[in-house]
Image (cartoon, rainbow, N blue to C red):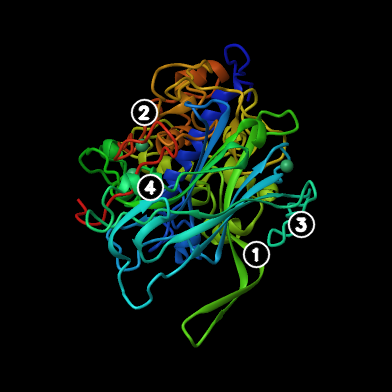
Amino acid sequence: MQALAIPARRPLSIAIAIAVAVLALATVLVLAYGPGPGPGGAKASSHSEAPLISQDPRADNTDLYAWVSPDDTSTVTIVADYIPLEAPASGPNFYSFDDTVLYEIRVDQNGDGVPDIGYQFRFHTSTVDPNTFLYGTGPITVGSSGYANWNRPQTYTVTLVHFDKHGHVMGNPDHPGKGPNDPVVLGTNIPTPPGNVGPRTTPNYGDLAAAAETSLPGGIKVFAGQRDDPFFVDLGSIFDLGGLGPFNPFHLLPLAATAGVDALANYNTHSIVMQVAISQITAFSKPTIGIYATASRQKETVLQDNGTKDTHGPWVQVSRLGNPLINEVLIPLGKKDYWNREDPWNDSQFEQYYTSPELAGIENLLYGAPPGGHPGGALAPIATTGRTDLKAILLTGVPGLNFTGPTDADLLRLNTSITPGPNGACPGGTPSTVAPLRMGVLDGDLCGYPNGRRLGDDVIDIDLRAVGQGYGSFLNGALGLPNLSPNNLVGDGVDANDVPFSSTFPYVADPHQGYQVP
Ligand SMILES: [Ca+2]
Ligand SMILES: [Ca+2]
Ligand SMILES: [Ca+2]
């Protein structure tokens, strides 16, 4: 595709990238319509998306976000979410990070798909009083000496690591050295907040959470703990043979049109939130970075007779996530767990699933009008092969927007030189005071997906329209991407999260309490 013509310094390729992203989302939706992964299968952006990881939720990446912080445009904020569908009322053992998992945010700074730096998070949980079943032995409060009455406090260590050209960590994170590429421990014993149990155990929850916001050397801010799941989607309808409430009458099996239902409303997740100076997270004079988050487990687990378990051996990546919905709806069932193990710099092996997405055919089948569709169908025919638009948006970046080179790699690409206004939007690439547009680049807001991803970006609708070649008038004009109608209106009817986000760090909303779940 041509490059995006962005006012001033921003090329047209942004629009293309957006379109590609939309297509990818559509693909995801189409796949979701088709034979699904079955019980425990795809749930959301990447919630329980593959057979093996669906049985290991505490190591399951659910979503990844990255944006230039509107309230401090010299920094990038990254949110890596893990653990899908946390029910708020989950006592007596409330959700936490897994002490035996290595959580990591990796950053490719030079466009070869191989990470150059990574931030490793290792957690440690203790039991204050083993002689009670209580999670909180009274109302949990927080003061200068930490949390009181919390019986299962969890803390963590953050370590900065560097990778060699083969993607191997240089030095030993367990024994940091002093060489320029040796691991650096940025902080230890950093507190996480308790889960949001209810008004008796966790009163003043906002104060409990705020106490876990931590500053590290170099001006880095971190927060790790339970949050509202910021992802929003009508999972119930989508996974019932690809239903989209507003488009129900046009489905192969028609139903009355309905509003969308956010199936993740009132569910929590666990977020790792980092805010890092752009000057620290970029290198090689390249403003665009490629980010992915992972979870790894040690190769050997030994179950002990005393009720404990020991883990040993090298780390094995069991989950990864760059762009949303990739393993969910682009990668076929038989390769999902393998995809989770693979490294992004080897993603050319999966290119066919981007350029010939199964989802496009499913959209044609379920919603397409004749010829090729069904009486009552509405969508214009969607190309099912040759989708270089999706390859650009998802594997290489969009020329002029966030292109990083010819190497295929599923990474969330963020051009840090595109600076948002105070509310987070940049229509046409220019900082603006308007609120972010949920359709991101598709509507000309170049600070949104697929240039990074903000919490409010509607990646389901973006991907549905991209896969459906309904890129909208902005990308059609800027990049010549197709703008089929009514494909450019497709969506699940859920346009926003169930609770507002914060305008300041850590941005993601407090978790839902478990006392009286709506
Ligand atoms: Ca690299
Ligand atoms: Ca939510
Ligand atoms: Ca939506």
Q: If you read the primary sequence from the N terminus, does the residue marked by circle 1 or circle 3 appear first?
A: 3
Image position, residue 217 (x, y; %) = 61, 42
Which is more foreground, mark 2 or mark 1?
Answer: 1
Label 1: few (<14), some (14–19) or many (≥20) C-alpha neighbours in 10 Å: some
Which is more foreground, mark 1 or mark 3?
Answer: 3
Image position, residue 13 (x, y; %) = 60, 23
In the rendered image, which residue does mark 3 sit on?
A: 171
Q: Residue furthest front?
A: 144
Q: If you read the primary sequence from the N terminus, does the residue marked by circle 3 or circle 4 appear first?
A: 3
Q: Type of residue at label 3?
A: Gly
Q: Type of residue at label 2?
A: Leu
In the rendered image, which residue does mark 4 sit on?
A: 209
Q: Residue 315: which numbered mark, if any?
A: 1
Q: Residue 489: which numbered mark, if any?
A: 2
Which is more foreground, mark 3 or mark 4?
Answer: 4
- The answer, for residue 298, to whether it is visible in the render is yes
Q: Quadrant of ligand 2?
A: top left
The residue that appears at 63% across and 15% down in the rendered structure is 9
Is residue 267 left or right of 13 when viewed as pictured? Answer: left
Q: If you read the primary sequence from the N terminus, does the residue marked by circle 2 or circle 1 appear first?
A: 1
Label 2: few (<14), some (14–19) or many (≥20) C-alpha neighbours in 10 Å: some
Q: Type of residue at label 4?
A: Ala
Element marked by disc 1: strand
Which is more foreground, mark 2 or mark 3?
Answer: 3
